[in-house]
Amino acid sequence: MTDERMTRRDFLQTSASAAAAGGLAMGIGALGPKAAKAADASDVAKTRSYHPEMEYRRLGKTGLWISAVCLGGHWKRIDKAVGHTGKGIFGGDFNDPDFQKNRYDLVTRCTEVGMNYIDACTIEEVRAYSKALQGRREAMYLGCSWFQNEIRNKNCRTAESLLQTLDKGMKESGLEYVDLWRITMLERSGQHTEAEVQEMMKALETAKKQGKARFVGFSSHDRPHIKWMIETFPAVVDVVVTPYTADSKVLPQDSLFDAVKKGKVGMFGIKPFGGTSLFKGDSSPASPEAEEDDRRARLAIRYILENPAITAPIPGLIDVHQVDNVALAVKERRQELSAQEKAELKAAGREMWANLPQDYQWLRDWEYV
């Protein structure tokens, strides 16, 4: 880990140089270890928790180098790792020592294999991962959203209220800065007025100028709305967080990725496993389907990384074994998916769509992006 400590004061002094580095990037494509060594060896090696066997991709115009697979904030099925179900969101209980140890150990393993970004999108997730990073804040880039008190909340749709949420969330989590503030929006276009989007962009731009957020962006589940915001606010939007699954495909025309590439916007892909619908088992170590599910997870990660416009998929992980498994997927992807592997993943993808629960039916809209 060679990344220097970053304070809010440091950010104000270095943001211009980071933006310049991002501006020099030729597109947003991934660089494997050999290509990265030839093109940007010194920059890549300085990234947080660098590991020579991990692949790193440039996060759009930010100039940051991000591991090709990262840690998503959700911890669904956490009871399979800690032995009981907590009371918090997605089953995790922030005050439970078993849960805290699980998150600490998981983050530790992420850094050991070269994963260097955490995406936390709820109040509970930001608190949990901020605690897990205490004493080693510079080991990971941290993206934050406090969605309960952001633009999804009808009382938090002005720049002033959004900035208050950021200040309160950072204070409660003991954060001096965040690497990425990515506000979580409602899922569909039309659910926010243009005036509300203007207020959100004003808040993001202000947070960046104040040095509270190094970079900014948003999360949305609506492709036309995402495209419109990237094109309308090119000077503000650094990163988008949006679905991309094990069976998503790039539209041959009018793809969202056209805007992503043109705007040099970083992109994190959520729901790579269809919210666990890709898997046969229940994620417990003793599951008879555990080996098959590990293989499906690796195939999904390898497939998603074939799209160079995606910075990284960000699966939620519940134990160190799952960390090792997705890191192995990055190593395996040095070879292209074989015809047999493609057929295997295609069949698994059909099962994933068929297994989506009712509250995840909206994910079908992301089969073509």
Image (cartoon, rainbow, N blue to C red):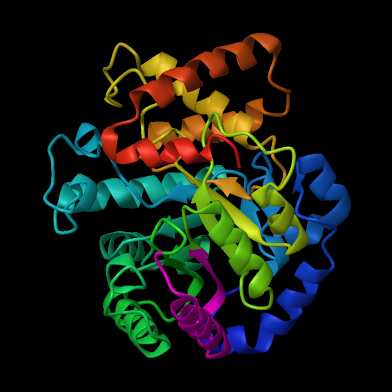
Q: Name the one closer to the observer, 105 or 215.
A: 215
With respect to residue 110, does 332 lie above or below? above
- Asked where in the image residue 145 lies, by quadrant, the reply is bottom left
Horizontal side of 333 relative to 91 (left or right) equals right
Say whether residue 1 is visible. no
The percent position of residue 237, horizontal first and vertical second, equals 61, 71
Q: Is residue 221 magenta?
A: no
Tell me if residue 360 can be seen.
yes
Nearer to us in this view, 313 or 251 = 251
Q: Residue 69 vs residue 195: left or right?
A: right
Residue under the image location 51 percent in, 52 percent down: 242
Q: Position of residue 139 (x, y in %)?
A: 51, 61
Q: Which residues are magenta?
A: 191-218
Which residue is depicted at the point 46% across and 56% down? 118
Q: Is residue 109 above or below residue 47?
A: above
Q: Determine the residue positioned at 50% across, 65% down.
A: 218
Residue at left offset 46%, top offset 83%: 199
Q: Quadrant of the N terminus?
A: bottom right
Count every numbered label the image shows and give the total. 0
Residue 14 left/right relative to 101: right
Q: Is residue 289 left or right of residue 296?
A: left
